[in-house]
Image (cartoon, helix red, strand yellow):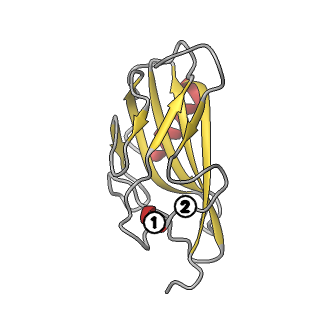
Amino acid sequence: MVSSEGKFTIISTAFKEGEMIPEKYTDDGPDVNPPLEWKNPPAATKSFALICDDPDTKIGIVHHWLLKNIPASVTKIDENGTAGETLPNIKGERNYIGPKPPDGTHRYFFKLYAMNAESLKATNKDELYKEVEEKKIGEAVLMGRYTRENKK
């Protein structure tokens, strides 16, 4: 639902802002995407894009999930679900890949962008990041953390 009232927000029923992401949604578990819901996008929203990334790696930002062309009428993505069109992640796969930090605790950002276009043309992460910057009219972010302590 597109609205002009309230703050544009994204939440998950699996974890709250800043909390640890449950193992179920990581490479140490079944590795399914967490459920996500959002509300109050800008009234002029024509579609959404979603980027899930980890900025805490030694190799730079690692992108775990890239979605574009999510219809403006969509307000959630179910657990182990998807919406719109999926672009290749860091592994070159068109799906969600959960956290698996090699060291310490990493932060994972689920960034939902309200777009002023119904369709984005991006075919890879670089094009998507660029197009999002050019066409976003709103942004909502949910950050979760994960550590592999006691994991091998």
Q: Is residue 140 left or right of residue 47?
A: right
Q: Is residue 25 left or right of residue 112?
A: left
Crowd tier of the residue under label 1, counting other residues whose Cα lies within 10 Å: few below 14, some 14–19, many 20 or above: many
What number is the disc on residue 26?
A: 1
Q: Earlier in the sequence, mark 2 or mark 1?
A: 2
Q: Are marks 2 and 1 in contact (CB under 8 Å)?
A: yes
Number of numbered discs overlaid on the protein picture: 2
Crowd tier of the residue under label 2, counting other residues whose Cα lies within 10 Å: few below 14, some 14–19, many 20 or above: many
Q: Position of residue 122 (x, y in %)?
A: 41, 35
Q: Is residue 3 left or right of residue 70?
A: right
Which residue is disc 2 drawn over? 21
Residue 73, above or below 108:
above
> Which residue is at 54% across, 27% downward?
39
Q: Position of residue 31 (x, y in %)?
A: 38, 64
How far apart are the alpha carbons under marks 2 and 1?
A: 8 Å
The answer to whether residue 74 shows anywhere in this view is yes
Assign a secondary structure to mark 1. Answer: loop
Q: Is residue 129 left or right of residue 143?
A: left
Q: Position of residue 120 (x, y in %)?
A: 41, 28
> Which residue is at 38% across, 30% downward?
69
In terms of depth relative to the viewer, which is nearer, 76 or 132?
76
Amino acid tagged 1: Thr
Q: Position of residue 117 (x, y in %)?
A: 45, 19
Q: Quadrant of residue 11?
A: top right
> Which residue is at 50% across, 47% downward?
13
Given the current orientation, which residue lies at the most extreme front position? Answer: 13
Amino acid tagged 2: Ile
Assign a secondary structure to mark 2. Answer: loop
Q: Quadrant of residue 123?
A: top left
The answer to whether residue 121 shows anywhere in this view is no
> Which residue is at 66% across, 25% downward?
7
